[in-house]
């Protein structure tokens, strides 16, 4: 009697655990179904449809993609993403690594330097964009004044199609390097002291130590950060939206800005979905690589 | 800095003159970087207190001749800051409540209750990390315009932010990893003592999770406070807009405000996140290391 009661209780506990388990998962599953899984499916469906303002839809096959590929601005947006990435890699990629190493080496004021470089990351993108519009202003802006001190020629910054994109890269480097440097700093502090001590005893000088210990230890994180930067570059939006509207001459047009324009200016959700779908594919591939790399570093 | 460990440059190295020079250059470089980072932020403040005449001087003056604090009174009286502060806080509170309750419950179930099929469900959640943020704006907009099965139009309402807040794969992953670190025995022992799963979650797991919940709270605050594009698209009624959208629409884009007014408005908008950052720095740094790589 006693043992069967215990068994019954065991059974019911087990069952209850299952039921509660599903109940606790239900809100999340419903949220994901509505706002992640269904939207993904919907993008695919809508990319093959003509969606008009009244909300009625008709199947149009690959017509939306044809519109997209016939639009020179679409190609330009991808080229811009590529150019943005290239500039960010050449000028911005090593900055956080170097700064992190420097901060890790100084023997005072570490907290001060860490906080100062991180602050721009705390500032809202609207504030940062408006501030930099002001700094970039060719006649009233601070940047041309500073160039003047060094007898350098003034720049048109955002107003010229050749300098507009590099200007955005400059701004985003300022806004983002601190956040990345903090991550490098964390992994620098994880390097075992014994490695440096052993190398010192073996007579390795500082450059040899930097090259053979510091850099290899940072390499996995640097790979992950590279992918993060690519992911970020593909999704630049509010800064060009606020500062340039994609101009001049589409020089700062980004993929998301173009999607926004198709959806909310041209009211063509079908073409906007087709563009989103193509962006998904690229982002998904990049994210997949990111997770593979991150798993290896973790 | 007593706990500072051994790094690239050892104390022995620093005794050599050549290394001393390099070390000096390194410090100089860091100071330059710190100035270059902080000065633009300070420039907002400097520009905001210049007079309307001084702010348009060429070349710009590096320090205001007179401090016109009246700019702040002017902006405060013409732009309803309190309303937009309130809007932002209401938005943040709702998102916080939905996001934290939905994701902690789900993560607890995935970590400790493990109902059949939990691996598949986890995979479904993680797949969401593959397509980040704004890339989904078109389908999300269409869905919010007419919520499937219900037909509600959630555009231009805060529900458009509150309802989807639970679909956060990043939080679930983070919380599940954290819960995995809490020994199963602790939970099992409580269940055998007759405590229900929910009570066990409430009385044992949640109190242990305070640090990570604090970190996630800060991320929600900073993320929503700073967010611009999605609220700009969704909330079209001026009176309902959160602060950042309102500053863009009604201060930056409006002809009523001069350049120094705009700078004053931005200064006011930057202050709360900076206060939060300074007050809760430890949680943020822990968040960055906890999440490994999220900036």
Image: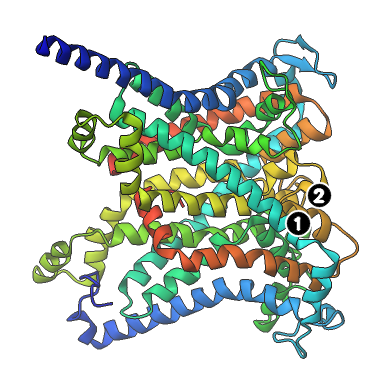
Q: Give the alpha-carbon distance from disc 2 to disc 1, as whole Å.
A: 8 Å
Looking at the picture, tell me which residue is in the foreground, B198 or B164.
Answer: B198
For residue A82, say whether it is visible.
no
Question: Closer to the N terminus: mark 2 or mark 1?
Answer: 1
Residue A195 numbered mark, or none: none
Residue A82 coordinates in the image, percent (x, y):
59, 43
- B108 left or right, relative to A54: left
Looking at the picture, tell me which residue is in the foreground, A28 or A103.
Answer: A28
Residue A188 coordinates in the image, percent (x, y):
29, 61
The residue shown at (35%, 62%) is A185
Q: Quadrant of the N terminus of chain B?
A: bottom left
For disc 1, the marked residue is: B83
The residue shown at (65%, 49%) is B90
Residue B239 numbered mark, or none: 2
In the rendered image, the vertical position of residue A182 relative to residue B75, given as above or below: above
In the rendered image, the vertical position of residue B27 relative to residue A117, given as above or below: below
For residue B64, say whether it is visible.
yes
- A271 left or right, relative to B110: right
Give me the chain letter of mark 1.
B
């Amino acid at each position: 009697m006693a043992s069967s009661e215990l068994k019954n209780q065991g059974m019911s506990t087990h069952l209850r655990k299952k039921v509660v388990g599903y109940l606790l998962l239900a809100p999340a599953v419903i949220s994901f179904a509505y706002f992640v899984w269904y939207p993904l499916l919907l993008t695919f469906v809508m990319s093959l449809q003509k969606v008009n303002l009244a909300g009625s839809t008709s199947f149009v096959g690959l017509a939306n993609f044809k519109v997209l590929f016939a639009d020179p601005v679409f190609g330009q947006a991808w080229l811009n993403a590529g150019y943005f990435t290239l500039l960010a890699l050449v000028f911005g990629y090593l900055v956080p690594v170097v700064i992190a190493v420097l901060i890790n080496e100084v023997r005072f004021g570490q907290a001060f330097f860490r906080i100062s470089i991180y602050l721009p990351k705390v500032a809202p993108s609207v504030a940062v964009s408006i501030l930099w519009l002001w700094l970039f202003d060719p006649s009233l802006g601070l940047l041309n004044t500073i160039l003047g001190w060094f007898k350098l020629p003034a720049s048109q910054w955002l107003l010229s199609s050749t300098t507009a994109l590099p200007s955005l890269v400059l701004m985003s480097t300022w806004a983002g390097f601190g956040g990345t440097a903090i991550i490098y700093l964390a992994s620098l502090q994880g390097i075992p002291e014994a490695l440096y001590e052993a190398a010192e005893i073996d007579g390795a000088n500082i450059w040899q130590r930097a090259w053979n210990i510091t850099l290899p230890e940072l390499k996995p994180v640097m790979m992950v950060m590279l992918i993060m930067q690519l992911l970020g570059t593909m999704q630049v939006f509010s800064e060009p939206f606020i500062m340039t509207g994609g101009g001049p001459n589409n020089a700062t047009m980004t993929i998301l800005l173009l999607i926004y324009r198709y959806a909310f200016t041209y009211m063509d959700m079908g073409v906007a979905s087709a563009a989103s779908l193509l962006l998904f594919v690229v982002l998904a591939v990049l994210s997949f690589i990111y997770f593979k790399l991150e798993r290896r570093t973790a | 800095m007593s706990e500072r460990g051994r790094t690239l440059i050892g104390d022995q190295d620093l005794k050599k003159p050549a290394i001393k020079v390099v070390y000096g250059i390194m410090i100089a470089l860091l100071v330059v970087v710190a100035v270059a980072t902080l000065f633009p932020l300070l420039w907002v403040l400097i520009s905001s207190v210049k007079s309307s005449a001084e702010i348009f001087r060429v070349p710009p003056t590096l320090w205001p001749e007179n401090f016109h604090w009246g700019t702040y009174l002017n902006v405060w009286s013409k732009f309803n800051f309190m309303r937009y502060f309130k809007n932002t806080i209401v938005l943040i509170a709702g998102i916080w409540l939905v996001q934290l309750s939905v994701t902690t419950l789900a993560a607890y179930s995935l970590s400790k209750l493990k109902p059949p099929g939990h691996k598949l469900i986890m995979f479904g959640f993680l797949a969401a990390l593959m397509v980040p943020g704004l890339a989904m704006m078109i389908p999300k907009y269409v869905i919010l315009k007419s919520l499937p099965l219900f037909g509600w139009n959630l555009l231009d309402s805060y529900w458009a932010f509150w309802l989807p807040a639970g679909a956060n794969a990043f939080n679930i992953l983070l919380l599940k990893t954290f819960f995995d670190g809490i020994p199963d025995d602790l939970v099992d022992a409580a269940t055998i003592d007759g405590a229900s799963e929910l009570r066990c979650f409430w009385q044992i797991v949640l109190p242990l999770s305070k640090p990570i919940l604090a970190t996630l709270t800060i991320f929600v605050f900073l993320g929503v406070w700073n967010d611009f594009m999605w609220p700009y698209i969704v909330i079209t009624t001026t009176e309902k807009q959160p602060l950042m959208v309102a500053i863009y629409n009604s201060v930056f884009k409006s002809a009523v405000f001069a350049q120094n007014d705009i700078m004053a408005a931005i200064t006011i908008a930057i202050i709360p996140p900076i206060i939060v950052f300074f007050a809760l720095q430890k949680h943020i740094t822990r968040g960055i290391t906890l999440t490994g790589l999220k900036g």
